[in-house]
Image (cartoon, rainbow, N blue to C red):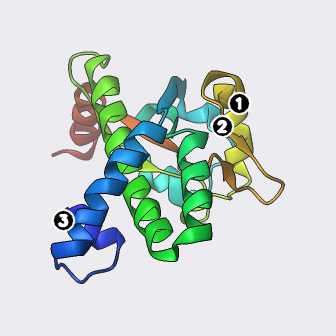
Amino acid sequence: MKELSAYLRMGGCEPRGALAGRIEELKAEILKAMRPRRTWRRVSVADIPRPGSSLLRHLAGCRDAYLVCGTLGTGVDALQRRLSVTSGADALIVQALGAAYMESWMDEMEDAIRAELAPGESIILRYSPGYGDWPLAAQRDLLEMLDSSRTVGVSLTDNMLMVPSKSVSAVIGVRSQELESGVHSRRGG
């Protein structure tokens, strides 16, 4: 509820009373509508499409990275559209629930990626196209490299909007203790 209240911009207040009850009802609906899927692929940092200087700074010290894509599926979009006809408030709640569930789904994907890392490796924070100076247009290349339309059902509109809307693409850098040790020893510390 705390995360949901942030997405609803409730200033840290948790929903109570009738609102909390309605949120619980809509949670049940969104959980039925969700068909979460995800895919990832490990690549060399040199293979990341059109990296800007901000992404390269973010990936400093990483040789490899994961290209990732996750989605909650088209059912969430359909539910939100249906609710927007009858209740803007319900559609807003489903939008916030979708954002919270999407974040949780991506966190679970990071846990799955951590499980396949070699000893001494760790991952850094996700970085998505459109952040910093990494162009949003790089998302098309990233999704093509993941074959996301086939593997998870995620595509892009001409305006670079992801379909389904509750989808995320990103790069997650891989750090190696071995590499970090070498960097520190070259610096003399």
- Residue linked to disc 1: 149
Nearer mark to the viewer, of 3 and 1: 3
Q: Are marks 1 and 2 in contact (CB under 8 Å)?
A: yes
Whether 105 is drawn above or below 127: the answer is above
Q: Amino acid at mark 2?
A: Val
When asked about the image quadrant of residue 11, the answer is bottom left
- Residue linked to disc 3: 2
What secondary structure is marked by label 3? Answer: helix
Whether 119 is drawn above or below 158: the answer is above
Q: Earlier in the sequence, mark 1 or mark 2?
A: 1
Q: Amino acid at mark 1?
A: Ser
For marks 2 and 3, give the CA distance. Answer: 29 Å
For marks 3 and 1, give the CA distance. Answer: 33 Å
Left or right, 93 with reference to 1: right
Q: Earlier in the sequence, mark 2 or mark 3?
A: 3
When asked about the image quadrant of residue 5, the answer is bottom left
Q: Which mark is residue 154?
A: 2
Nearer mark to the viewer, of 2 and 3: 3
Q: Earlier in the sequence, mark 3 or mark 1?
A: 3
